[in-house]
Image (cartoon, rainbow, N blue to C red):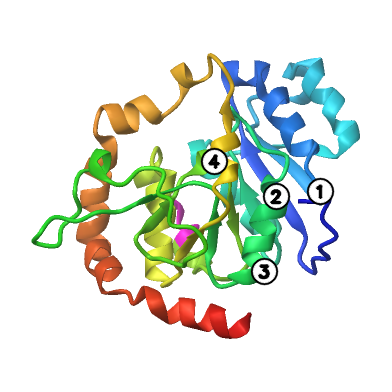
Amino acid sequence: MKKSDLTLKPKLIVSVTSYGERLETLDICLKSLINQTQKADKIIVYLTNDLTEADLPSKLLDLKQFGVEFHFIDQDLRPHKKYYYAIQEYPDDLIVTVDDDVIYDQELLEILVATYLKFPQSIIAARAHQITFTEDGNFQPYNQWDWEATITNEPRMDLIATGAGGILYPPHLLDYDFLLDLSEIKRYLTVDDLWLKAAEVQAQVPTVICDQKLEANRQGIPHTQAQGLFNHNVGQNENDIHLKDLDRKFKLAEKIRSYDNSQIADVAATDN
């Protein structure tokens, strides 16, 4: 794909959060976001205000010349910081959330945006899992879902976007009052993907996986996973505990299973 000439009315905002030892390797991730074929209008790193710019490595501060901004915020909402503050600061713009421990394909933003233009009523993901169910309609354990699903360019409610791949959120599709409810967020502080999925199900907004090359070319930054939430959420089944609670409160399984995936696909096909 050649360098993009897409003209966007909303701005393209890339949002990432980091902490602790991850700051020593964050520049690797940020450089992969700077060197994109589709340039972001802003790349914002959200950090808690127990830090100041004086605490950041010089290799991070050097990236300010390329438009990287560091915003220091009051509340440590853990991974929720990626979307919570960006959506409030830029409610009318495209928000792309990424993880801080990944080297991203240089076409990540271009492909996310191109897929958004085809499916503007969907969440756009470079990586997603397909949710699976038991015979009686309940969720199967998270570890038994179809990880890294390959159903591309098809809006589906049974897909859950995962932050590691990069996710594009179009403006005003979700109910921001629901999504940004701090009392609820604090109940699900470590499972941002599940909370975001709950907000998407409530708003009846499906997910689309874009070009598989993004996932194929995604590289983890060595020695960063030891501090991550993956081992806690997946290895210790925290995802299943929180998912059961979310399902009890919001009837997620029932709503996902009853959603007609073809309805929005037909609209997208007509629009194109």
Question: Nearer the observer, disc 2 or disc 4?
Answer: 4
**Alpha carbon of mark 3 to alpha carbon of mark 1: how far?**
16 Å
**Residue found at x 73% / y 38%:** 33
Mark 4 or 3, nearer chain start: 3
Q: What range of the chain is rendered magenta? A: 179-183
- Is tag 1's residue or tag 2's residue first in the polypeptide sequence? 1
Q: Which residue is mark 3?
A: 117
Three-letter amino acid code of the residue under disc 3 = Leu
Instruction: Give the residue number, with chain letter if any, for mark 2.
Output: 109
CA distance for labels 2 and 4: 13 Å
Q: Residue furthest left?
A: 136
Query: Does 1 lie within the magenta span?
Result: no
> Could you tell whether 50 is left or right of 237 in the image?
right
Whether residue 263 is visible, yes or no, is yes
The residue that disc 1 covers is 39
In this view, 131 is above or below 201 = above
Q: Residue at x 31, y 46 (%)?
A: 146
> Marks 2 and 1: in contact by CB < 8 Å?
yes
The residue to which callout 4 is attached is 215
As displayed, is residue 142 above or below residue 268?
A: above
The quarter of the picture where residue 246 lies is bottom left
Q: Earlier in the sequence, mark 3 or mark 1?
A: 1
Residue 85 in the image: x percent, y percent?
62, 49
Residue 88, image quadrant? bottom right
